[in-house]
Image (spheres, grey):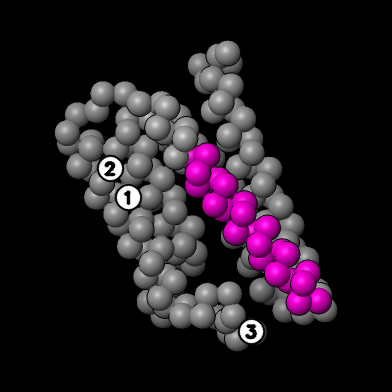
Amino acid sequence: MIFFGFDLKFILITSYMVITYQIIALKYKKSRYFRFFSIESKLALISLHVFIVLSNILLYFWLIMTDFRKVHIILVVAGILICGAGLLIIFWSGYSLKKLVFIPENKLITKGPYSYVRHPMYFGGIIGAIGLALLRGSIHGLVYSFFLTVVLSRIADVEEEDLRAR
């Protein structure tokens, strides 16, 4: 089924991304109470967060693998380079954080990629998604990347509100 030029699969996958990432935003809105949660509750929330991220990545791969167009070699090379840059930014961000989730409270990280971009992992993910869409020639992937940018910007705003409140 086609709606406004987009098939139902694209609409469902994009809707899933928007809804599930709003759950992550809600988690950040309530995170100031996180320290009062039991270990089991914290692990459940972290597991939910990881599940949401991984399920969205897998659905994105499925989306772009089934929305294939013949692509000029220049776009393929550009896609590989852009995706590689996104992955490099993500790994550099993780390395800079060292302990990822267990950052000392009230400490703002300003070294490494965090000295250039406020949310380098989000930035790297968006860049990587755009690169993969170019590599596959996926219009749906490019549109999805736009929505991903909007959603991750919203989550970043919520995270920053939470940090200011602490």
Please state which amino acid type lies under the numbered disc 1. Cys
Tell me the SS state at disc 2. helix
Identify the residue position indicated by label 1 in the image: 83
Q: CA distance from mark 3 to mark 2?
A: 38 Å
Identify the residue position indicated by label 3 in the image: 106
Q: Residue at x 49, y 64 (%)?
A: 119
Marks 3 and 1 close (CB-CB < 8 Å): no
Q: Residue at x 41, y 63 (%)?
A: 90
Which quarter of the figure is the C terminus placed in? bottom right
Mark 3 Cα-neighbour bin, 10 Å: few <14, some 14–19, many ≥20: few
As drawn, which residue projects farthest toward the left?
Answer: 73
Please state which amino acid type lies under the numbered disc 2. Gly
Viewer-nearest of discs 3 and 1: 1
Tell me the SS state at disc 1. helix
Earlier residue among tags 3 and 1? 1
Q: Position of residue 19 (x, y in %)?
A: 68, 43
Residue 66 seen in render: yes
Q: CA distance from mark 3 to mark 1?
A: 32 Å
Q: Is residue 24 above or below residue 136?
A: below
* Label placed on residue 79: 2
Left or right: 115 as drawn, with respect to 144: left
Marks 2 and 1 close (CB-CB < 8 Å): yes
Query: Which portion, as a residue range, is magenta?
Result: 38-60
**Residue toward you, 146 or 20:** 20
Examine the structure image and report whether residue 52 is included in the region drawn in magenta.
yes
Q: Is residue 30 above or below residue 136?
A: below
Dividing the picture into quadrants, the one containing residue 16 is top right
Which quarter of the figure is the N terminus placed in? top right
Dividing the picture into quadrants, the one containing residue 158 is bottom right
Please state which amino acid type lies under the numbered disc 3. Asn
Q: Position of residue 138 (x, y in %)?
A: 38, 30
Q: CA distance from mark 2 to mark 1?
A: 6 Å
